[in-house]
Amino acid sequence: MTDPLSASLAAAVRAARQDRELSAGTLAERSGVSRAMIGKIERGEAQPTAVLLSRLASALGLTLSELVARAEGEDPGLSRRADQPTWQDPVTGYLRRAVSPPGGTELVEVELPAGAKANFPASSYVVADHQIWVLSGELRFHEGETVHDLAQGDCLQLGRPVDCAYENTGRQPCRYLVVLTKR
């Protein structure tokens, strides 16, 4: 792995699992991610997608922002733009920036490329309540069987945890803010 954040994420996943005294098998059962993939991620042999990371974070009792903050090794009370960690999904091109310091309410800015779709299992939503605020572009949000077409300025409060998908139906990148309030 050449990306320093990916290597740090590998160490953060391993450390969080060990801190909770979980075996890779137990984490696999809780997250729905195979034991083999967890081993590859922890050894830095595979770059995880946003979906895999969110499943692992949730199974570890963390939000994705908290896991990324652990990988960065810092948890300051002030989060300057230059210090805000970013991470890009290698499959969808989804670009995620943790705007706020983790803990309490978290702000995460996402840029989803035109035509991209990122699916997340219900388990990704059990740790925190979510709101989505579209900053620019068009976003089709699939909340289980319900589909929400959102435009700039629209804000959606998610209901109970169900499988969800963020889909950019427009021709330009879509930027949105996810507001997470840990339960």
Image (cartoon, rainbow, N blue to C red):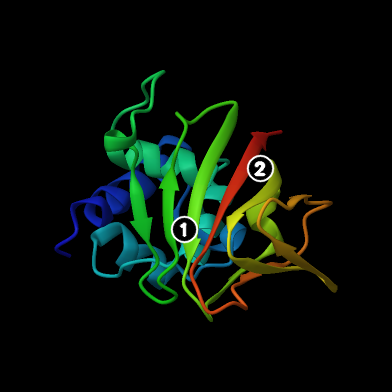
Instruction: Give the structural element (helix, strand or loop) at label 2.
Output: loop
Q: Is residue 76 above or below residue 3?
A: above
Q: Quick one: label 1, few (<14), some, or many (20+) residues within 10 Å?
A: many
Percent coordinates x, y for residue 39 in the rendering:
34, 64
Tell which circle, 1 or 2, labels the residue nearer the N-terminal end. Answer: 1
Which one is in front, 89 or 168? Answer: 168
Which sits in the foreground, 76 or 114? Answer: 114
Q: Count the numbered circles shown.
A: 2
Label 2 amino acid?
Val
Residue 151 coordinates in the image, percent (x, y): 69, 62
Reading the image, the residue beneath label 2 is 127
Q: Which of the image's four quarters has the C terminus?
A: top right
Q: CA distance from mark 1 to mark 2?
A: 14 Å
Side of 3 where 137 appears, left or right: right
Q: Name the quarter where the N terminus is drawn.
A: bottom left
Residue appearing at x 46%, y 58% in the figure: 53
Q: Which of the 4 quarters of the picture holds residue 107? A: top right
Residue 144, located in which quarter of the rendered image?
bottom right
Which residue is tagged 1?
53
Amino acid type indicated by mark 1: Leu
Q: Which residue shows up at 63% across the image and 55% down it?
A: 124
* Residue at the image point whose x is 44% and y is 67% from the top: 35
User: Is 135 left, or right, of 17 in this rendering?
Assistant: right
Compared to residue 175, the image places residue 99 above or below, namely above
Q: State the image coordinates of residue 90 (x, y, percent, origin top left).
A: 35, 72
Instruction: Please identify the residue farthest to the top as the structure is shown.
Output: 77
